[in-house]
Amino acid sequence: MAQRDTFLQTETSPIKGISFPAIHGTGGLFTQSPGAAAILAGLKQLLLTNQGERVMLPEYGTNIRKHFFEPDDIQTRTQIQREVEAAISRWEPRISLRNISVTQDTRADRADYSALKIRLEFTIVDYPYEVQELTLIL
């Protein structure tokens, strides 16, 4: 299993993509991410892009930010989960979703702090034996 983990993180991995956020590296401003890092960067970019934000692809992204000031209840969380599922199924064919959880992230150090926590569990279609995870706190 360690070989597979290592393979997905190396430069020889067949999976490549642009790093997100864009960082200036040896390849210029648009440095490539190898393996699973490319897919994680693509997922972050997809989920953090508002629909309508991309001029040539106005349907790309999600509208999860519109829910930030909605009541923190099961209906809102279900709507967010559905939006995330729909966006991933349409725009990210490289992965197979296993689980999505949308919860409230409260920090004990600040009583007035509350954030939305979206946790994805998925497998890469070409490497289904390894479960990947992405957690976004918004």
Image: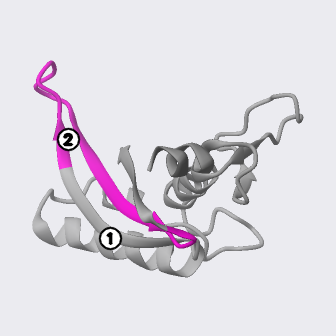
- Residue 23 x %, y %: 73, 32
Question: In which quadrant will I find the C terminus?
Answer: top left
The total number of labels drawn is 2
Q: What element does badge 2 sit on? A: strand
Q: How is the image coloured?
A: one colour
Q: Residue at x 62, y 69 (%)?
A: 52
- Residue 84 x %, y %: 40, 69
Q: Is residue 63 above or below residue 69?
A: below
Which amino acid type corresponds to the residue marked 1 in the rendered image?
A: Arg
Drawn side of residue 54 relative to residue 121, left or right: right
- Residue 107 x %, y %: 17, 28
Drawn side of residue 85 relative to residue 73, left or right: right
Question: Which residue is under mark 1?
Answer: 98
Q: Is residue 19 above or below residue 63?
A: above
Spatial separation of the CA atoms under disc 1 and disc 2: 21 Å
Q: Is residue 110 in the magenta section?
A: yes
- Residue 125 x %, y %: 53, 73
Q: Nearer the viewer, mark 1 or mark 2?
A: 1
Which amino acid type corresponds to the residue marked 2 in the rendered image?
A: Asp
Residues in magenta, as a range: 104-127
Q: Nearer the viewer, residue 97 or 9?
A: 9
Q: Earlier in the sequence, mark 1 or mark 2?
A: 1
Q: Is residue 46 visible?
A: yes
Q: Which mark is residue 119?
A: none
The crowding category of the residue bearing disc 1, from other C-alpha atoms within 10 Å (few below 14, some 14 to 19, many at least 20), is few
Q: Disc 1, disc 2: CB below 8 Å? A: no
Q: Residue at x 49, y 59 (%)?
A: 47
Q: Nearer the viewer, residue 42 or 56?
A: 42
Q: Residue at x 49, y 79 (%)?
A: 89
Q: Nearer the viewer, residue 118 or 133?
A: 133
Question: Which residue is under mark 2?
Answer: 105
